[in-house]
Each structure stands twice: as structure tokens, then as C-alpha cells.
Image (cartoon, coloured by chain):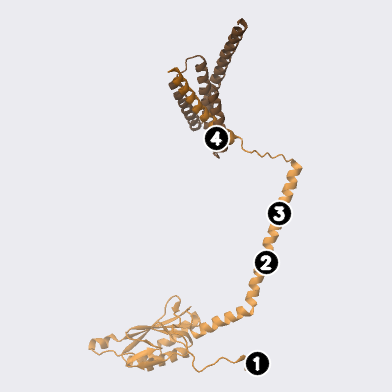
Amino acid sequence: MWLPVLGLIIGVILGLFTEIKVSEEYANYLSIAVLAGLDTLFGGIRAQLQNIYDEKVFVSGFFFNIVLAASLAFLGVHLGVDLYLAAVFAFGVRLFQNIAVIRRILLTKWTSNKEKTEKN
Amino acid sequence: MKNVDKRKKNLSFTLIAIVIGFMIAIQFRTVKEPEVRDTRDTWQLRDDILKQNELQLKLIREVQSHEAKIAQYETELKHSKEQVLRDTLEELKEEAGLTEVTGYGIILSIEPVMEDLLIGKTVSNVSPDLLKRLVNELNMYEASHIAIDNQRLINTTVIRDINNETKIDGHSIKKLPFEIKVIAEDAKGAEKLYNRMQVSKSADEFFVDNLRVKVIKPEGKITIPAYQNAIRIRDMKPVDPEKGGNS
């Protein structure tokens, strides 16, 4: 489980050390892509804990969500409506739900573990 | 089998985590631009405006002084000996015929008489004596600059016959008709010259040689080319300044 965390750290370091800067206009797209990525990541972790993890779903979900979110933002810019807020809202809600589910699963695991050790 | 699956799962998780981390970092860098806030109050702003105004004033003064200097240099140049010498040189060159001259004047076209051509007479060359006479007459009527067949006449120009060819300073007049361009002092002078040439005597002399002088008065200015050859002065020497005194 520690490998993905390491990957996240490596990615952050890589991003900080490379001198890439996105111009102001595309910052919106990137932020929404980051949100989509995070949503997928937490969804994956939840699925893993619930034992319903499917690699294909995870990987395709990651890319598809990012592209969908970015294109939604693009459409919003061209229509003059802040459509990216819809993506932000959807991903935000899902992020919270996923984290809540993960917390509950971890809590039940922890308590069951504790009970087991107490029984022993 | 399960182990392989788990490793594969971990790998994809890690890769996607790296990508997400990368994106977060870039987003962080993009958003977290060093924001410089203007926290000056009214008095500080006033002070700054004052400073900028002073700077502007200083710059304007500098520009003014530079412009004054340029003007000064120009006037100095105008009055300096060098400029006087330059001007004199230019004047002398113009007088000697080394520059192109444009001005009001007339054009004399020398052409063979057509009637004689029909009879079958061959038109010989224009004789140097006739040309000399014409030039003298033109000079008498205050012509300033003369060019025969685009060959500028200067003070030392010789018009002579070499092997039955009329030559003006080495330039031979072979074909007829040719033009003599004359520039007068001004438009009024040109008018005068034109009127005088209409009744000129040398035109009659030309007619004897089966040549006709046609006087044309152009509307605008005419241009006479500069003297092309080098002016050789054989029997003159510059004055020795030692002997002539240091005046």
C-alpha cells in the first residue's frame, strides 16, 4: 500500500523540479483534471477495500474522467457558462463520499481487529 | 496468480499516483505565483507620484539641454572655418563645372535642313568655328552653364577639328541632330536668352552650312551634367605659404 503514496510523492517532486508552468488560461483545465484524478484515485482505493477493484475500470476511469472534465470546462468557456463548476461539484461530492466510505471500512476493520486481539 | 494481480494493481496505482502528483505540483506552481500586493496608503502614493514627477522633470530638462547642445553644435558648424571652406569649395566646384546643374534655360537643337537632304546634299559635320561662335554668343547673352551634346563646357574647354571630326574636349560630335543645353541665371534670364536666340546671327551662319538651329524653351527646369574629365592644370602652382606669409 505504501507504493502509491511513494508514487504520489515522486510525482510531486518531479513536478516541482521541472520548470513547467501552465499559462493562466489553462490553469482551470488543469485544476479540474487534478480533481478528476484524485476522485479516481480515491475511488480506486475504496474499490480495493471493498474487494470490487477492477483494473480496467480504474485506468479507463482515470483518463476518461480527466478528458471529460477538461472538455466540459472547455465547452463552458465557449458557451460563456461556468460549466466546470458542475464537474467540480460532481467530483467534490464523490470525493467526499469515497473518503467517507474508506473511513468507515477502515474503522470497521480497525475495530474488528481490536476485538480479535482482545478475544485472544 | 493472485500475487501477479496484486503487483499489477500496485503498479497501475503507482503510475496514476505519479501522474496525479505531477499534475498537482504543476497546478501548485501555476496558481502560487508570487503575488505582490500594493499595500501603500494615500500618502505613500502621493510621495511616489511626487518622485516620479521629479524624475520626469529631470528627464525633460536633460532632453532640453541635449537639444540646445545640438542646436549649438549646428550653429558652430555653420560658422566654423571648416564649413566656410566647404561652402567655398562647393561654390568653386559649381563655378568650374564639376557639379550637375539644374535651372531654367533653353535648348538649342541643331539639325540638318530637310530640304537639302531631299535635293541630295550631304550634310557635313558642324564646324568648330560655328560652335565657338555660338558659344560666344550665348555667353554674351549671359548664359551661366552650357552643355553641347551633354558634354559640359568649362573655362578650359577646347572646340576643335581633329581629323575632320569636331571634338569638344575629346568628345566628338558625330551624329546630327544634337542638342545644346543652356542654363541662364533664372527664369527671367532664360526668357531673355530665348528671345535673343530667336533672332540670333549665328543661326543664320548655321544655315549657310545647311544646318538649322531650333530654339526650344522647356516648361520646367533643365539639367546639365557635370564635367566628366579631370581638370588638368599644367602651368599653375600652389602658393608657397612660407614665402607668401602667414596671413
Q: Nearer the viewer, residue B210 or B99?
A: B99
Q: Which residue is mark 2?
A: B68
Q: Which is in the foreground here, disc 2 or disc 4?
A: 4
Q: Which chain is brown?
A: A
Q: Earlier in the sequence, mark 2 or mark 3?
A: 3
Helix, strand or loop at mark 3: helix
Q: Which is in the foreground here, disc 3 or disc 4?
A: 4
Labels 4 and 1 positioned on one and the same chain? no
| Residue at (65% x, 69% y) in the render | B71
- The answer for how far apart the CA atoms under marks 2 and 3 are is 20 Å
Q: Which residue is mark 1?
A: B245
| Residue at (46% x, 82% y) in the render | B183
Q: Which residue is mark 3?
A: B55
Q: Quadrant of the C terminus of chain B?
A: bottom right
- The answer for how far apart the CA atoms under marks 2 and 1 are is 40 Å
A65 to the left or right of A114: left
Q: Amino acid at mark 4?
A: Leu
Q: Which is in the foreground here, disc 4 or disc 1?
A: 4
Q: Chain of mark 3?
A: B
Q: Nearer the viewer, residue B11 or B213?
A: B11
Q: Residues within 10 Å of mark 2 (few under 14, many from 20)?
A: few
